[in-house]
Each structure stands twice: as C-alpha cells, then as structure tokens.
Amino acid sequence: MPTPTSAVKSKPVVRSAELPGSFMKSLFAGALPADVVFPYPRQDAEARETLDLVLESFRSWARERLDGGAIDRAAAFPEAQVRDLKELGILGLTIPEEYGGGGLSITAYCRLMEEIGHHCAAIATIVGAHLGIGSKGIVHYGSAAQKKRWLPGVAKGDPLCAYALTEAGSGSDAASLKTRAVWDETRQVWMMNGNKRFITNGGHAGLFTVFARTEIRGEDKISAFVVTRDLPGVSTGKEEDKLGLKGSSTTDLYLENVPVPKDNLLGEPGRGFKYAMEILNE
C-alpha cells in the first residue's frame, strides 16, 4: 500500500494551462494559481494616508463615545452614535466622491470594518448593511439619474439603507422568493406586495433595495427596486429580540400594494437575482 507521501509524489502536476478559471476550483484541483492571487490589492501611498486619517478619526471618537458592551446591554438602536457616524462621514466612505462620499476602495472598507468591529459589532452591522449591501445596488447598477437622486443623501447617512432579499420561505434559496411587483400601465407604477424577513437596519432605514418577482416579456423573473419608506404601503415590524448584536435593528418589511414608481426599477428588468448575488458576493 502506498504511503501518503508516495501518493502525493505520484500525483500528476497540474499545469497552469489546465487550471480551472476559478481560484476555489483550482484549490480543489490541488493547485494554487499565483497569477489569480497576485498582485494582491495594495493601496498606494495617498490611499493609505487617507485611510490612516479615517481610522485615527474613528478611533479618537470611539475612545470617547463608543461602548459596545453598553450598547448591547441597552438592547436599543444607538441613535446618538449613528448621528455621530453621519457627522464623521463614516456612513458615506465608500460612496463615489462625485456624490459626496469618500470614494474608499473595498480594501479600505474592509480595514475600516475591522476597526469598527473591534469596538462594537452592532455598529459594524449597521454600517455594513448601509454601505456593504443596502446602497451597493444603486452604486453598481443605478442609472446616472438614480445615483444623482439618492447617493448624495446616502453619503450623509440620510436615508439609512437596508437590503431586502430574505423571506420567510426563501432564506438560502433566495430564488424562491414570493414578493411580486405587477406593472400597472395606467398609473405607470409597479404594484408591489410581499413580506421580507430579518432586514438589518429595517426599523430605521429610509431606503430599501428590494427584490421581487416580475413578468418580463412573458417570463417570471426577479427584478430589483429602490423602495423608500415614504411610499404608501411600506411598513416594518417589531424589532427581533436577538441573542447578540442587540444594538442593531432587525425587523420584517411589509409591502402592501406599494406603488413603486417606474424610475425606481434598478438596472435591467429581470436581472435582479444576478444583482442580489453579486452584491452579496462582494
């Protein structure tokens, strides 16, 4: 019987030309494709200097104003700290500069989230839902008019953003969602009905990226929409009593005959599931 060592030695070498196009598939094939990994994303001197200033500003504030343990014990949304984050510009750091944001890269964002999480996981969740997923759809797929309309406010943290994909019967199987938007030709709106579950920032968000089933050229497809809290029929449920992260807001989102304007359709109709997965992947 061959020893483990001899088995490894006898294994054929996988040449780079034979490697799968995916980094993870390559690992399963027993190969590390260096050209996929490197050059590892590194910041230039100016970007590092900007990030260092942001981190120092946050740390200085956190030392005086952020007690993660106290926030968790209070089990309430930290209104005062979120107001401070708006003033510090933290809630707009990854929004493009032309819309009033900081234009930070994903590398800088990850480093910032590491620092926030060190001090308070609930605050990290609030910021992550706002920047990481809640507003990402507009940044990536919004039209020029949509970006101009919403991103300047988002960069200031007003409105706070949320991401509404999960439903009671569609968690990990997101494609089975039931929320539906039906086009009303007379009113030129999408009439939306459905319920979303476990929406982070739900109780305090003013803007939701919502995914719903739509009929596109006779086919049932998922589309993405920007739904604002001021639209008739939009409401949220009670705050979930969670085991941890008690300072973050987690609620259901109710959509009852919501007239979503046609200009609130995000990106291309029928491409919503692709958008949802790309946002989560990033």
Image (cartoon, rainbow, N blue to C red):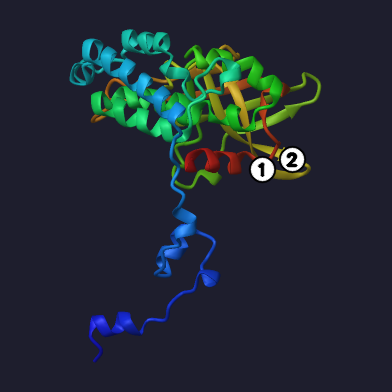
| Figure quadrant of residue 1 | bottom left
Picture disc at residue 221: 1
Horizontally, is 27 left or right of 8 in the view?
right
Q: Residue 58: x percent and y percent?
A: 32, 17
Element type at mark 2: strand
Q: Residue at x 42, y 81 (%)?
A: 12
The residue labelled by disc 2 is: 216
Element type at mark 1: strand
Q: Residue at x 39, y 11 (%)?
A: 88
Q: Give the residue type that dot 2 points to.
A: Ile
Q: Residue 62: x percent and y percent?
A: 26, 16
Q: Is residue 261 visible?
A: no
Using the image, determine if residue 66 lies above or below residue 94: above
| Figure quadrant of residue 144 | top right
The residue closer to the viewer here, 139 or 46, is: 46
Question: How dense is the environment of label 1, judged by Cα within 10 Å: few (below 14), some, or many (20 and up)?
Answer: some
Mark 2–mark 1 CB contact (< 8 Å): yes
Horizontally, is 48 left or right of 227 in the view?
left
Give the farthest residue toward the bottom: 1
Give the farthest residue toward the front: 45
N-term mark: 2 or 1: 2
Using the image, determine if residue 131 lies above or below residue 232: below
Label 2 – label 1 distance at C-alpha: 6 Å
Q: Is residue 121 visible?
A: yes
Question: How dense is the environment of label 2, judged by Cα within 10 Å: few (below 14), some, or many (20 and up)?
Answer: few
Q: Give the residue type that dot 1 points to.
A: Lys
Q: Residue 243: x percent and y percent?
A: 23, 30
Picture disc at residue 38: none
